[in-house]
Amino acid sequence: MNNTRKMKTRGCAFHLAAAIIFLSGCDRFMTDADTYDYSIEQQMNCFCSQGGQWVRLHVKADTIADATNISNGNHLTSEQWQPYRTIHGLFDEITKWDTSMYHVDVTIDSTFGYPSFLSIYQRTVVHGDTIPFATDGGFNNTTRNYVTFNR
């Protein structure tokens, strides 16, 4: 069975296979000057302190400079915004996981070409007569409302 799935959106092609993720054609978005200074809203669903909360990230020079909880307006400390990712950080997350051990599901924003949804969770692996179980709960990351500061 062929487990390869290809998604193509706005010039970016993602090939998700059992053992490899290959990114091609994405360098236009990833090298544009307007991808370094922007704001996005992001939600992490994970076993972490900020799990499930929508946060507005302000990114300067491709680094998170500030984060605000959207529901209450409180600013997060740098420790609290650790689970969140810049756009480049989302692309890094896509490529770092071994797809023979983890499911990696990606949806690309059709307007700007960034990962608007990223889901990573451990595959169940059976070894001999053992009962399969996952030791990593994984995470989902949803990103929306990209606004560049350079236009």
Image: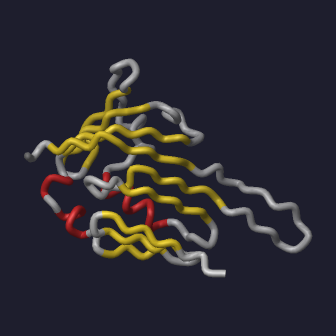
Query: Residue shown at 32%/55% (left/top)?
Result: 110
Instruction: In the rendered view, tell whether residue 117 sits above or below residue 128.
Output: above
- Is 102 in front, or is 135? 102
Residue 58 position in % (x across, y down): 25, 38
- Looking at this rendering, what residue extends furthest in the bottom direction? 1
Residue 83 position in % (x across, y down): 45, 44
- Looking at this rendering, what residue extends furthest in the left direction? 151
**Left/right of residue 143 with respect to residue 2 in the rendered view:** left
Query: Residue shown at 45%/74% (left/top)?
Result: 15
Query: Residue shown at 47%/31% (left/top)?
Result: 53
- Is 50 in front, or is 45? 45
**Left/right of residue 33 with respect to residue 94 in the rendered view:** left
Name the image quarter holding residue 93.
bottom left
* Quadrant placement of the N terminus: bottom right
- Looking at this rendering, what residue extends furthest in the right direction? 129
Number of numbered tags placed on the structure image: 0
Instruction: In the rendered view, tell whether residue 51 sits above or below residue 70.
Output: below
Instruction: In the rendered view, tell whether residue 126 sits above or below residue 63.
Output: below
**Left/right of residue 64 with respect to residue 92 in the rendered view:** left
Residue 89 position in % (x across, y down): 35, 56
- Is 142 in front, or is 64? 142
Instruction: In the rendered view, tell whether residue 99 sits above or below residue 51.
Output: below
Query: Residue shown at 51%/77% (left/top)?
Result: 20
Model colouring = secondary structure
Name the image quarter holding residue 65.
top left
**Left/right of residue 40 with respect to residue 90 in the rendered view:** left
Residue 82 position in % (x across, y down): 41, 43
